[in-house]
Amino acid sequence: MRFRYLIALTALMMPLSATVAAEVKPEIAAKAHAKSSSTAKKAAKAAAGAAAAYSVASVAAVSSAPAAEEKNQRCLAAITAHKLDEAENLCRQALAEAEKSAPNSKHHATALSNRAALLAQQGKPAEAEADYKRALAMYESSLGPNHLAVATSASQLAGFYYQNDRYVEAEPLYKRALAIDERALGVDHPEVAKDIYNLANVQALLGKHEEANTAYKRCLSIREKALGPNDPAVARSLSGMGVNLAMAGHLNEAEQSLKRAMQINEQALGRDHPDTEYCRTWLNKIQAQRLSALGQ
């Protein structure tokens, strides 16, 4: 028998942030930090630096339109802080400045991308989608189809589709982001692991369990090497893999994956942390499924 806990799976597999293409942990917004070795800390710091450089908000080291970039950064900060009224005013200013001083540029695209994120938070999906698509096209035309900002923008649009249960549309966009990042950053880069993780989540929800499992394993391997075996990001990969295996009916493998994820989370985050509790809940579901099978 197979699990059919798609709602629970969706809760586990949170999509990318609508503002910056960075993986969001299940059920929480804040990033937790575990104690790690010096090597793992250096790897995590390097990954964080790469993520900052990778985000749409900081595409260029030296801006050709400083006023537009400054307004975009202020807008992004307000959106990230969920100050929606302030963000709406700042987004309007940023877009007007970009249209005046840098039309059809990366700055213009960033302003559109930020406004799309705001519109999504405001519950205006049709308008948000239009801005995300327009931003992606503008990044492509201004920077070329293989720029890292294009990968970020594709991931943002994919994350939007994910949030709206449009998994079929999200999958090719995550694949495109992955292909760009692999070429630009290397196949074992932590940003590539994020792309793989998000793609695996979508494939699991589409019922492509074998493909998803292969992707989770690859993501897990990259993260273990980059961050060490006991990092919360490793636990997230294991949790996603475990839930996918449970949905496919592979209960023994699912249990092993979820147990390891729970152990990492207990040590790194605590027994009562939502991530730890999530693993515990799924392990209880597996046990309940086994008991139900015995009674049939």
Image (tube, rainbow, N blue to C red):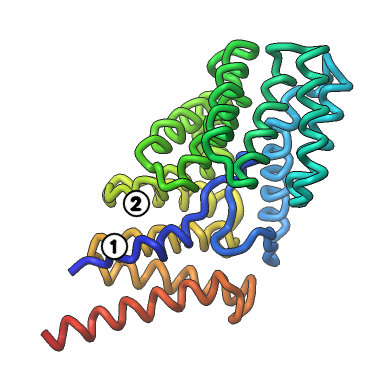
Please say if 170 is above or below 13: above
Decide which of 27, 133 is in the foreground and name it: 133
Q: Position of residue 62 (x, y in %)?
A: 83, 20
- Left or right of residue 294, residue 40 in this image: right
Decide which of 222, 235 is in the foreground and name it: 235
* Local SS, label 2: helix
Q: Which mark is residue 204?
A: 2
- Left or right of residue 152, residue 7 in this image: left
Q: What residue is drawn where x is 74% and y is 44%?
A: 79
Quadrant assignment for the C terminus: bottom left
Disc 1 versus disc 2: distance between alpha carbons?
8 Å
Circle 1 Cα neighbour tier, 10 Å, few/some/many (<14 / 14–19 / ≥20): many
Task: Return the disc, 1 or 2, that comes first in the chain's sequence.
Answer: 2
The kind of residue tagged 1 is Met
Circle 2 Cα neighbour tier, 10 Å, few/some/many (<14 / 14–19 / ≥20): many
Q: What residue is drawn where x is 57% and y is 33%?
A: 127
CB of mark 1 within 8 Å of CB of mark 2? yes
